[in-house]
Every structure is written in structure tokens, then in C-alpha cells.
Image: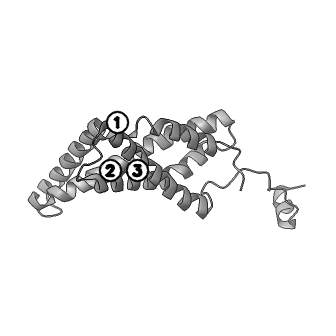
Amino acid sequence: MNRAIAAAQGNGAFRDGPAPIVPHLPLLLGGAAAWGLLMAACAFFSLVMQGRWQSFHLEKILVIYFAGGFLAWLCVLPIARLLSRRRSAEARFAAHFALLSLGTVAMTAFVFAMDYRLFYAQWHQPFGTRTWFLQFLFTSAGATYQFLVMGLGLYLPVGLPVLAGASLWLSRPMMR
């Protein structure tokens, strides 16, 4: 029997099929909030372990790591689901692990760069000029480099097991 006809008849032929690429709203938004909180917790735990948690920038650091994790989950989860559809559990785990780690770092670096840019905007040329574009480009590149050198370490040591656990959880068979 044709699948389209079976679906139209409502006999549940698609019940065991692959999940949609964009997950349901509770998983998408709830997961993003949870991932953002976990990334902020990783940063906080690392700062506590290093004895630097009493920084007067603590709230801003935690907000940046939360926002990076939140945005990364929203962007990465549909891409990982698309790439790992109809694949083995190992491939789904690898896709989620790689994309979630790279996406989280990239989005947190982006949020950090935009915060950095806001600080230096007062000395930049008016929006849209060639000089403004170059200032925006090089300020963002410098901030990204600074984040990679100084901020990447705040994901460790807690971030790696959290990433592995989330990837393992996401690599379960994708049901609706």
C-alpha cells in the first residue's frame, strides 16, 4: 500500500518513521534554556575552581555563556537532526557532539564579540562607512580571538561530560 494513502487513512504507517527535523517546541526552547544554564554553570564552576568567581564581571560572563548556549541549541539541533537522520546511533552521537560543541563555542564567541563591539562602538565611525565596516570586522575578529584564548577554558572540566551526556541523550532514536 502506498505510504501517502496509508497516512491519509490514518493507520499509523508513519508512527515509526524519522522525527521531524525541527523538534517540537518544548524540546527546542526547553532544551535551549537548559543548555544555556548548563553552559553558564560550566563557566561558573570553572571560575570557582580557579578562584576567580568573585570577579565584578561575573554576571556578565554568566549571561554571555548562557546566551551562547541558548542560541547554539536553537541553531544546531535542527542541523544535527538533519545530518543524522536515518543514521546509526554512533553517527547521531557524533553529529550532536561535534555540532553542539562547535556551535556552542561559535555562538558564545559571537555573543562575546558583539558585547565587545558595543563597548568600542563609541569610538567607531558612523554606521555604513567603509571605515566602520573595517572597525567592525577587526573588533569582532579580535574579540573572537580573545574569547578563544581566555574564554574557551571556562567550558572545562565540566563541559566535556555535560556535552557527552547531552549528545548521548540526543542520539536516542529520534521519535516524534
List the residue tagged with mark 2.
Answer: 110
**Horizontal placement of 167 versus 75: left or right?**
right
**Horizontal placement of 139 versus 87: left or right?**
left
> Considering depth in this image, is 3 or 154 the residue closer to the camera?
154
> Considering depth in this image, is 38 or 69 the residue closer to the camera?
38
Residue 82 locus on image (x, y percent):
60, 47
- The secondary element bearing badge 3 is classed as helix
Q: Residue at x 80, y 56 (%)?
A: 15
Q: Residues within 10 Å of mark 2 (few under 14, many from 20)?
A: many
- The secondary element bearing badge 2 is classed as helix
List the residue tagged with mark 3.
Answer: 40
List the residue tagged with mark 1.
Answer: 153
Instruction: Say which quarter of the image contains residue 63.
Output: bottom left
- Residue 84 position (above or below residue 4): above
Amino acid beneath label 2: Phe
Amino acid beneath label 3: Ala
> Considering depth in this image, is 60 or 71 the residue closer to the camera?
60
- Earlier along the polypeptide chain: callout 1 or callout 2? 2
Amino acid beneath label 1: Gly
Image quadrant occupied by the C terminus = bottom right
Residue 37 locus on image (x, y percent):
45, 54
**Horizontal placement of 165 versus 67: left or right?**
right
